[in-house]
Image: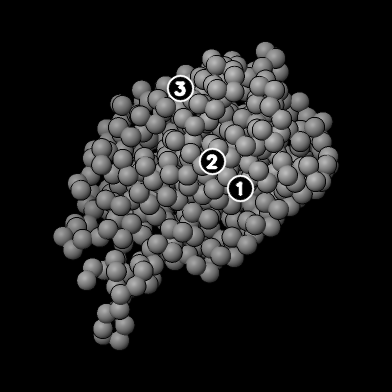
Amino acid sequence: MSNEQSTVIGGGEARRLHYGWVVLGMGTLVVFGALGLARFGYSIVLPAMQAGLGMDNTQAGALATANLMGYLVSCVIGGALASRFGPRVVIACGLALAALSMVMTGLAGGFVSAAVWRALTGIGSGASNVPVMGLMSSWFAARRRGLATGVAVAGSSVALIVTGPLVPRILTVQGADGWRTCWFVFGGATLALAVGAALLLRNTPSDAGLRPIGFRPDDQAPSGPSGSKRLADVYNRPIVWLVGLVYVAFGFSYIVYMTFFTKVLITDGGYTQAQAGQLFMTMGWFSLLCGLIWGSASDRIGRKGALAMVYIVHAVAFALFPLWPTSVGFTISAILFGLSAWSIPGIMAATCGDLLGARLAPAALGFITLFFGIGQAAGPSVAGAMADAAGSFSTALWLCAGVALLGAAGTVLLPLKRHAR
């Protein structure tokens, strides 16, 4: 009987579900709260919140940037703390901070106070999301790592499916202040997930007397830098910096698309809030398996090939909004993005585990997320200002398509090797 399926109890063996699947399930819910509600919930709430606080597009973009700057601040620290003290406590505390900050966002009286609370939400999101993705490298061997991180990122998809119909319904019932109720609901759900994370997550398989899922007795321990236990090796390897630079393209391009998705549908496409919510939900359904599909593909064809393909799909999705501004074009764009949406973070998390091993994977992911976060922080403010200047988001979306193509080109140049299967 393999170690994936058994534990030793009193000298005998008992067949049961490997606890790694519990960790993966809870990790997916952590992503649901840390990103799906805390970050992407802003997109569906934005039109009502923007009207309620009297913000223009530049301010709406700046509010998203405040959230992402908070994420940027915490991602490196959160990953490093998780590598030093263990992910579980860092994840639970990060989720709790994000939850409380979302509740306070619902109480904001203007742009400045909302920006402060969105920034703190970002800090909590980064402190929970980065370590939980790195945790997958501890619980899953390299041959299963892409699959695991691909499943975990589906938490964001679940959030789109839930918030797409839920937010318009709350807005209809609550009226002008319905966006505040939305943040209260998001915060309450995330606080419950923080408690769940504290109770269910485990830092390593050895804590439960197990080996990682996918482990084989003939597996060799990583050698060289990938097997190092020195935190400095995260920051002094050129390949880690190059991966981070490629990650910038995703951060900049996707966040503009996601932040202003509902806004563009309503203002440029003539959609109602409910219709925009339905397409938001549709994108969520199509994205539900994207991480699993592309993560598994990266296990088979290599991280580099999978990354390049996803970047190209994203470029097409972003370009369709300004190129074909009809319900058909918007729908195809949403489907294409959904089919590949969260796969890049999943592949990047698996890449960090490949390069530096399970122990340093959270710190490595936190470091490359610094680059990703720079792109994220710049994107909404740049796009909002471009939209106010041009009168539409078309130019900004064309820019996003170009940046995604640059990401594909940069990926091809990465010196990544396929791991043995």
Q: Which residue is mark 1?
A: 162
Q: Name the residue rendered at 76%, 36% in the picture.
A: 48
Q: Secondary structure at mark 2?
A: helix
Circle 2: residue type: Gly
Q: Marks 3 and 2, how far apart in space?
A: 18 Å
Q: Marks 2 and 1, how far apart in space?
A: 9 Å
Q: Is residue 387 above or below residue 182?
A: above
Q: Would you call the spot at circle 2 few (<14 residues within 10 Å), some (14-19), or many (20 or more)?
A: many
Q: Would you call the spot at circle 1 few (<14 residues within 10 Å), some (14-19), or many (20 or more)?
A: some
Circle 1: residue type: Val
**Label tally:** 3
Q: Secondary structure at mark 3?
A: helix
Q: Nearer the viewer, residue 91 or 235?
A: 91
Residue sitting at the far bottom? 10
For marks 3 and 2, the one nearer the N-term is 2
Q: Position of residue 56 (x, y in %)?
A: 76, 25
* Residues at circles 2 and 1 in contact by the CB criterion of under 8 Å: yes
Q: Position of residue 83 (x, y in %)?
A: 43, 56
